[in-house]
């Protein structure tokens, strides 16, 4: 019985590793080369397919976890870096204080598009009200979604 369980566990591990390697193999070499040229010091890179024509790479740079969206030709479409609440621009902090008073913020990220334009995404929770919100650098609310609705929408698909 032990041998059977060990065999099953080993087989599951091999399948998981093989699946990851096959996903890595589907990333175009040009995409990887473009990323490597932009971030030569990146460590712990992990590639995945975001959607057709877009690849996400999670990586560590200067001891900070980051991610980037890369097109098949190696162009960086967007970068994301996790930041602390203290790293938010004053205008964003002011909007949050005014429109989201009492909300606890979590998973705060700064995104930059290909042109370097920054936006800030985060989760906000107050009691049972859980939101995904994003702002531009001037504190303008760009998006506000209920996380409960988002989960329900994913389950229905």
Image (cartoon, rainbow, N blue to C red):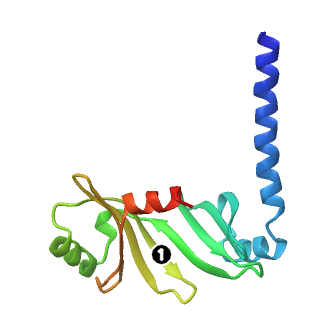
**How many numbered circles does the render carry?**
1
Residue at the spot 70% in from the left edge and 73% down from the top edge? 35
For the C terminus, give its image quadrant.
bottom right
Residue bearing the label numbered 1 = 111
Residue 145, horizontal then vertical, whole percent: 36, 69
- Whether residue 1 sits left or right of residue 58 in the image: it is right
- Whether residue 61 sits left or right of residue 130 in the image: it is right
Q: Is residue 25 above or below residue 111?
A: above
Residue 153, horizontal then vertical, whole percent: 48, 62
Residue at the spot 77% in from the left edge and 70% down from the top edge? 32
Residue 137, horizontal then vertical, whole percent: 35, 83
Q: Is residue 12 above or below residue 128?
A: above
- Whether residue 33 sits left or right of residue 151 in the image: it is right
The front one of 142 and 117 is 142
Does the image show residue 12?
Answer: yes
Residue 138: which quarter of the image? bottom left
């Amino acid at each position: 019985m032990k041998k059977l369980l060990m065999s099953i566990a080993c087989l599951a591990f091999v399948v998981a590793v093989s699946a990851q390697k096959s996903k890595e193999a589907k990333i175009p070499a040009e995409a990887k080369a473009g990323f490597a040229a932009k971030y030569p010091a990146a460590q712990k890179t992990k590639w995945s397919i975001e959607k057709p024509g877009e690849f996400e790479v999670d990586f560590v740079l200067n001891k900070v976890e980051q991610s980037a969206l890369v097109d098949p030709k190696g162009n960086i479409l967007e970068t994301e870096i996790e930041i602390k609440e203290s790293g938010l621009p004053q205008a964003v902090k002011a909007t949050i204080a005014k429109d989201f008073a009492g909300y606890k913020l979590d998973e705060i990220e700064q995104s930059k598009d290909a042109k370097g334009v920054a936006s800030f995404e985060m989760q906000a929770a107050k009691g049972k009200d859980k939101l995904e919100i994003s702002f531009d650098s001037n504190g303008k609310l760009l998006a506000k979604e209920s996380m409960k609705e988002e989960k329900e929408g994913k389950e229905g698909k």
